[in-house]
């Protein structure tokens, strides 16, 4: 037994095991301490291993003695069973670590996605600053709505139908290729819950304009302000509400009336 205690190899093994026991079991028991995360345990053990290797290799005689058990396990016929056991153990450990890295995770995303993230108070549209708070659709104040709705219908079917569908239900030809799916405007949980200024913002800025809470799944919709004018987007908004039959939410006015 004393021979083992004086041997550098077994001293190194003992130090390594002792360090693991202290980090995993002793430190969490100290007042004010908590369980050490596995990633931190791995970092500490890697540091301990490096320190042990530096110690055993610091002296040539100690280093030579340290390598003797390893050398014997690799070449001695009488240790074939031990050699095969170590090979199987190493293979099993590597396999388990690999599996733990590639297995599917059911953990929730780090940031919960909001279907209707809060819009900014104002946006910049082609260099023009537009305040969204309290903003109503300006086309509703420009006389007859039919021409504006007709323009919105034309723009929708020229640009939006491949994703949002002929029936505005998010079932366009390309819809299944996106995550998340395109918005279903027929659903009472989409534009029926929103103000027209919100819809204008989402169309104008598209997926690139989503705030952080709109991720982790980014909308594939482009920023339509690069292709459509302000009035064209407002006309599409009019068409969406006219076609689906929903009424847009209105802004509260003083006194609590709507």
Image (cartoon, rainbow, N blue to C red):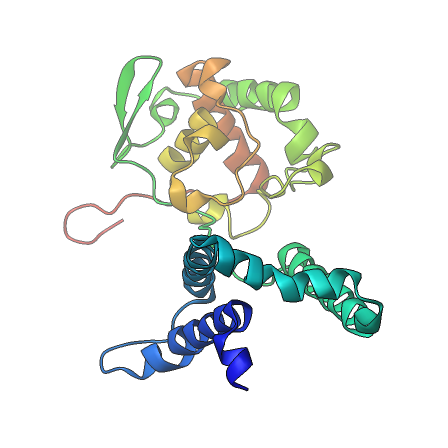
The correct choice, above or below, for 79 with respect to 165 in the image is: below
Residue 68 in the image: x percent, y percent? Answer: 63, 63
Residue 66, located in which quarter of the rendered image? bottom right
Q: Residue at x 53, y 29 (%)?
A: 239
In the displayed structure, 210 sits above or below 97; it is above
Say whether residue 98 is left or right of residue 62.
Answer: right
- Pick the front one: 253 or 73: 73
Closer to us: 9 or 99: 9
Can the viewer see residue 194? Answer: no
Q: Residue at x 39, y 31 (%)?
A: 201
Measured as percent of width and height from the top left, residue 153 is found at: 59, 24
Q: How many marks?
A: 0
Residue 115 seen in this snapshot: yes
Left or right, 183 with respect to 54, comes to right
Give left or right: position of 216 versus 80. left
Looking at the rendered image, the quarter that the N terminus falls into is bottom right
Q: Where in the figure is residue 255, as x and y percent of width and height?
A: 15, 52
Against 151, residue 253 (above or below) is: below
Residue placed at 49% from the left, 79% from the top?
Answer: 5
Looking at this view, is 191 or 123 the one in front?
Answer: 123
């Amino acid at each position: 037994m004393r021979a083992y205690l004086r041997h550098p190899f077994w001293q190194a093994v003992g130090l390594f095991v002792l360090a693991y026991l202290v980090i995993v079991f002793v430190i969490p028991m100290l007042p004010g301490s908590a369980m050490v995360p596995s990633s931190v345990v791995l970092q500490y053990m890697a540091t301990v291993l490096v320190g042990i290797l530096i110690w055993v290799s610091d002296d040539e005689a100690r280093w030579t003695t340290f390598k003797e058990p390893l050398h014997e396990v690799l070449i001695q016929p009488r240790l074939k069973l031990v050699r095969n056991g170590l090979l199987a153990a190493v293979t099993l450990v590597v396999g388990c670590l690999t599996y733990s890295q590639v297995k599917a995770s059911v953990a929730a995303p780090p940031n919960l996605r909001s279907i209707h993230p809060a819009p900014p108070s104002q946006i910049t549209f082609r260099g023009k600053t537009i305040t969204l708070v309290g903003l109503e659709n300006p086309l509703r104040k420009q006389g007859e709505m039919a021409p504006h709705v007709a323009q919105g219908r034309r723009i929708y079917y020229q640009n939006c139908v491949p994703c949002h569908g002929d029936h505005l239900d998010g079932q366009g030809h390309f819809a299944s290729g996106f995550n998340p799916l395109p918005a279903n405007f027929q659903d009472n949980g989409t534009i029926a819950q929103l103000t027209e200024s919100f819809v204008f913002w989402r169309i104008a800025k598209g997926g690139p304009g989503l705030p952080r809470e709109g991720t982790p799944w980014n909308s594939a919709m482009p920023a339509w302000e690069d292709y459509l004018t302000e009035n064209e987007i407002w006309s599409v908004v009019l068409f969406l509400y006219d076609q689906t039959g929903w009424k847009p939410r209105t802004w509260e006015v003083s006194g609590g009336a709507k």
